[in-house]
Image (tube, coloured by chain):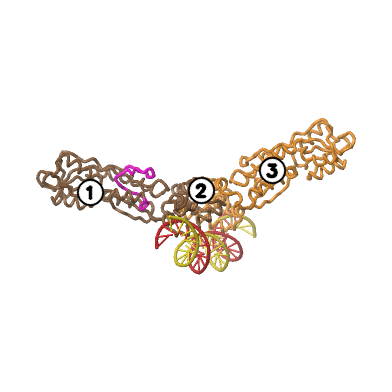
Chain colours: A brown, B orange, C red, D yellow
DNA sequence: AGAGGTTACGGGCAGCGTAAGGATC
DNA sequence: GATCCTTACGCTGCCCGTAACCTCT
């Protein structure tokens, strides 16, 4: 009996098939067959009923699953508590919404790769909805998104909120929201929908809303006087101090953007757990440094 | 990280040396070195301080030890609860006192090897004192002896007691313990010492006591009229029904022989745990079948 | 035909034992 | 020199991937 066998068993049980487990573990499918059947013959017990459309746990298999989970849990615990982080190797896939990427993500990456120098990082920047799916499909290990992700398998660590203020080009006259478009987050995002609803209610159907998937492009458009819009105060400070943009008050303020660091609780991943923790620390100290 | 590495680590920690662990695990000493140093480099942590006279756990090593014990415990649990006994292989070393060997040991061996057909059995018959030492030195895995063994590491399962009755050759006249020797268990045993003390008190210094390490030889001597002695009633029934010996009452009866099935609780051994359980069952049913 | 699992086979590498090497008393 | 652990090295055997095969829809 080896850890690899138990881990393989665990994933076959969890995903309900040898082929799916082979993808999860980056192995050939026959390798999964070998591992499982070796384990079965070592224990002298059949763990799966093979049906044409996948596999199902036998009674023995069900019993083993609990123990296998314990094993993998303790193993992660060892990696977390005993192992030296600088020796941990692997690939860690991070997904981030652009707001975070523009804010404290660089500092996070610095801190993370400092603690885990031998871990390679895959970074994806996307909108929260896509990140959520990627996370649930295990295409990424840790996501910074507008959460929380409410699936019960997902752990959500709350991150500091971003207050939204309204900005317009410096020196432009009073703002008439009927005349100048409002630019905001990409169309499929929650802040976009919220803003859309609020503006329709207050301004009427003539309001024009641009949406942009690129935060920095949006800010450039604001600075160029093409549009106005609500943006995280903390991210506007650069153009603000350059004198390119200025705040204004259209009479209401969208609710702050709430982010979480989210990861799958099962199976355990030390990197995801610790990554979320580091993110919380970094985000808080970044928030203090960049407070109004 | 593998089970073998953790097990090796455990034994090195427990025995305080690589060489001792290599003997415990039946491996060469360099193999222990390799395993430990591989584990150390995988965790990126030094687990042992190497001193000229052995090794000592580092702080990290101490932390790991707890987790390693958990792992090995769960592993044994899997073998015990999930694995099919008929597939378990290995060597199981049993030590038994002769009384047990003459009583229900054959039936026990039959039941045990029936449940674990692929486990080889090493049987040693010796006096309880030696069995106790062998057990503590891990030369045997399970001992049937006059217990309990009071070391805190040892688990003791109580077995049915053996009542001692006095026997003499059939047809011989009234017994004068001043005239005929008393034969009993080997000199280093507890029943011998108890009997010695009791006889000295009651009969006086002239009493002669033979001691014999062989139960069957002793019974033969009684049957031959050379001596008389107290023996387990259950074991005398053969010669009794053949009409070779008969009971008599010298006015007192030694206390019954109390046996235990004893094994080391740490590290766990499924075979020892289950073996003790089987022994208890077999001994009880044997006791009923052979009751006066 | 296609999806899912098994069997067959060759090759690479982990890990063993033997043997030699260092350190400390 | 004795004891204990480490290093060196050749070899064996395990386990992976490729490829062919089986079975059920």
Chain of residue at mark 1: A
**Where does residue C5 sit, x and y in percent of width and height?**
48, 56
State whether residue B64 appears in this view: no
Q: Is residue A141 inside the magenta stretch? A: yes
Is A191 displayed left or right of B207 in the figure?
Answer: left
Q: For the C terminus of chain A, which image quadrant? A: top left
State whether residue B277 appears in this view: yes
Given contact means CB atoms under 8 Å apart, are the residues at marks 2 and 3 in contact?
no
- Marks 1 and 3 belong to one chain: no
Front of the two marks 1 and 3: 1
Q: What residue sits right under mark 1 in the picture?
A: A187
Is B46 displayed left or right of B20 in the figure?
Answer: left
Sequence-wise, which precedes: disc 1 or disc 2? 2
Front of the two marks 2 and 3: 2
At mark 1, the secondary structure is loop
Give the residues in magenta.
Answer: A137-158
Q: Is residue A264 inside the magenta stretch? A: no
Q: Nearer the viewer, residue B149 or A72?
A: A72
Q: What residue sits right under mark 2 in the picture?
A: A58
Chain of residue at mark 3: B
- Marks 1 and 2 belong to one chain: yes
Chain of residue at mark 2: A
- Count neighbours of disc 3 (C-alpha within 10 A) and say few if under 14, some if 14 to 19, many if 20 or more: many
Q: Nearer the viewer, residue A24 or A161?
A: A24
- Marks 2 and 3 belong to one chain: no
Q: What residue sits right under mark 3 in the picture?
A: B144
**Where does residue B72 sit, x and y in percent of width and height?**
54, 48
Q: Tell me how far mark 2 sits from mark 3, CA to CA.
A: 38 Å
At mark 2, the secondary structure is loop
Q: Tell me how far mark 1 sits from mark 2, CA to CA.
A: 48 Å
Instruction: Identify the residue at image location x=75%, y=44%.
Output: B102
């Amino acid at each position: 009996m080896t850890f690899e066998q138990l881990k393989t068993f665990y994933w076959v049980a969890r995903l309900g098939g040898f082929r799916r487990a082979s993808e999860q573990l980056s192995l050939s499918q026959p390798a999964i067959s070998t591992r499982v059947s070796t384990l079965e013959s070592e224990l002298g017990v059949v763990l799966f009923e093979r049906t044409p459309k996948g596999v199902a746990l036998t009674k023995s298999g069900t019993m083993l699953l609990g123990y296998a989970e314990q094993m993998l849990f303790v193993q992660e615990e060892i990696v977390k508590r005993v192992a030296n982080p600088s020796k941990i190797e692997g690939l860690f896939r991070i997904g981030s919404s652009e707001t975070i990427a523009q804010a404290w993500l660089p500092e996070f990456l610095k801190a993370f790769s400092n603690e885990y120098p031998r871990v390679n990082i895959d970074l994806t920047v996307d909108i929260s909805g896509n990140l959520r799916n990627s996370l649930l499909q295990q295409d990424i290990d840790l996501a910074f998104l507008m959460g929380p992700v409410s699936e019960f398998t997902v752990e959500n660590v709350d991150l500091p909120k971003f207050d939204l203020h309204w900005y317009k080009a410096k020196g432009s006259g009073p703002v008439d929201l009927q005349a100048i478009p409002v630019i905001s987050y990409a169309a499929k995002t929650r802040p976009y929908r919220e803003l859309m609803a609020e503006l329709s209610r207050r301004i009427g159907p003539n309001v024009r809303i641009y949406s942009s998937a690129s935060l920095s492009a949006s800010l450039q458009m604001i600075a160029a006087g093409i549009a106005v819009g609500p943006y995280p105060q903390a991210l506007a400070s650069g153009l603000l101090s350059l004198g390119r943009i200025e705040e204004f008050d259209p009479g209401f303020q969208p609710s702050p953007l709430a982010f979480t660091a989210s990861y799958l609780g099962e199976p355990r991943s030390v990197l995801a757990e610790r990554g979320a923790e580091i993110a919380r620390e970094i985000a808080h100290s970044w928030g203090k440094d960049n407070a109004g």
